Image: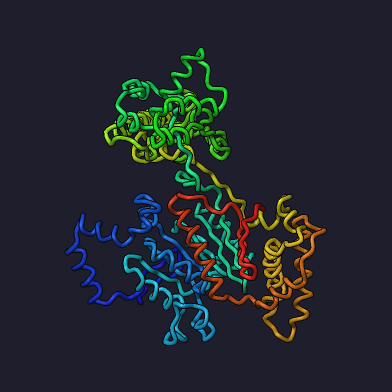
Amino acid sequence: MHLNGTDEGVSVLRLDVTESALKKRRLDREATPGVQAMAQRDKKYDRQLRIWGEQGQAALEEANVCVLNAGPTGSETLKNLVLGGLGSFTLVDGSSVQASDLGNNFLIEWSSLGKRKASVVCSLLHEMNESVIPKFVDESPEAVIDSNPAFFRQFTLVIATQLSEFALEKLDLICRQYNVVLLVARSYGLVGHVRISVEEHDVIEAKPDSRVEDLRFHKPWPELRRLVEEFDIDTGDPLVHKHIPFGILLIKILEDWKAEHGGQMPSSLRELKAAITSRKREHDEDNYNEALKAAYLVTSPPPLKPEFLAVLNDKKVEINSESSNFWIMVSALKQFMENEGEGEPPLDGSLPDMHSFTDYYIRLQQVYQAKAEADASTVEERVRTLLEQIGSDPDRISRTSIKHFCKNARNLRVYRYPSIADEYRARVGTEFQKLLAAEDNSNAALYVLLRAADRFAGTHKRYPGTADAEFEEDIALLKAAAADVLSEIGCHSASISEDLVGEICRFGSTELHCVAAVIGGVAAQETIKLLTGQFMPLGGPLIYNAISATATVFEI
């Protein structure tokens, strides 16, 4: 390794790369320029590109992440991120490899005994993916937090593993000052904890489990109506009759119904389905069967979700020169919905599979894509106008970004997390109180006990159960610390099982690899969500209970 310079007074080291390795890397670059190099990279990350796409992978590769502590939890988290193609990371740890590390950290070997842990872990992680840039700082995280807070402003995200609540409070203030996302991960015996802390996290691609089909059958636009009018659903050709796309059938049958009933909609889904069935000729007409299944889209169009409406009604929609690109686009979206959209967000332009002739389906698809393109162009015009109004460059937001935003508009989410200091000092909500009052309250109790263990360590300079001679006394002291935490969060009447208190003492703050592997997986997953702006991250602290093999996310 060699000194790679200093970051805000902290000596950052980079792994040695031998001359032969440098030569090989140079030759590889020369041999695989441009398209070929990109093809190799796409093949390497093929499986994950199918999940979060090119845009998500690019965000991951551009990220610079800091991980505090090179124990099993930090190492497992980094392993998952490195294999996924993280751009660069800095590992901060000031300890040497001990014999105890050999039993719980797969990234440490017998030959590493006595060596600096951050260097050893960094080296093995780099072997897993040489595209990732590894660095390390040979100092304790607590020392860096106390002496060089500005060190953390260079990072996209900081992952703090195995830190006490006192160190976390300081780090959280630093990260919020520099607008850096903080993710907390901890393994404590058979218990795990993951928590996100950031003032605001905006999600464009929420990718909910159930996708909303926005096909606008209840409100067809002029171009779609003209296409529908070209089809004769009463054609005498049986082959054509069973290959008209179900979307065309639904709109045409609904229009016929309204013409026969004075412009009125069917009073129920049953009436509409009866009208569809009456036009069906054979049992095996799959397009009519699809129309029957999708009939609800006409009588009950997809509603706008409360989370989406909350974004539209957020106070940040009133933009100014300090507003982020996200809120400028939300403001333009709201204007669009109040005007051209007639209460609807931009069409995303996607169609489900339909039993149809290929050319019929392509014509329908082209109409939907043209509408989506037109909606995005209208939103883009409003974005440009808003940017001019606030005195910003009208081309600051790319058309690609605006189209991406419009395509995913229905699933916009905004997450805001309280600071760690606020969480520790606030009284918990009624839901958490109910969980503590329940007969099986183990996961809620474990959340309290982890905080109590930190209180214990702050007073006694060690964690409960780490001194065998004082085990019974530690149980009593931890129970008292837990009672103090319960009182502070407004749960005076709640009680915690003595068995659980004893288990926490028995753990002795040990980091078990089996638990660290789970927590490392969760932490890496949440990190990818935060870096890519995709999927829905944890809404509150997560407690993993390996005793009962359960996990709970709390709203504190």
- Residue shown at 37%/62% (left/top)? 85
The relative height of residue 304 versus residue 222 in the rendered view (above or below) is below
Give the residue at the far left of this rendering: 31
Which image quadrant for residue 163? bottom right
- Horizontal side, residue 422 vs residue 493: left or right: left
Q: Position of residue 73 (x, y in %)?
A: 52, 70
Can residue 207 be seen? yes
Using the image as rendered, state which of residue 47 and residue 171 is in the foreground: 47
* Residue 10 picture location, percent across and down: 45, 68
Asked whether 165 or 58 is in front, the reply is: 58
- Left/right of residue 490 with respect to residue 195 in the rendered view: right
At a point 49% along the width and 41% down the height, the residue shown is: 411
Q: Is residue 141 above or below residue 52?
A: below
Q: Is residue 336 visible?
A: no
Q: Residue at the far front: name it.
A: 282
* Mark count: 0
Vertical arrangement, residue 315 with respect to residue 36, above or below: above
Instruction: Name the residue nearer the viewer: 139 or 353.
Output: 353
Report the residue at 38% width, 75% height from top.
123
Nearest to the observer: residue 356 or residue 80: 356
Q: Where residue 389 sits in the image (x, y, percent)?
A: 43, 28
Percent across and percent down for residue 398 are 34, 39
Q: How is the image coloured?
A: rainbow
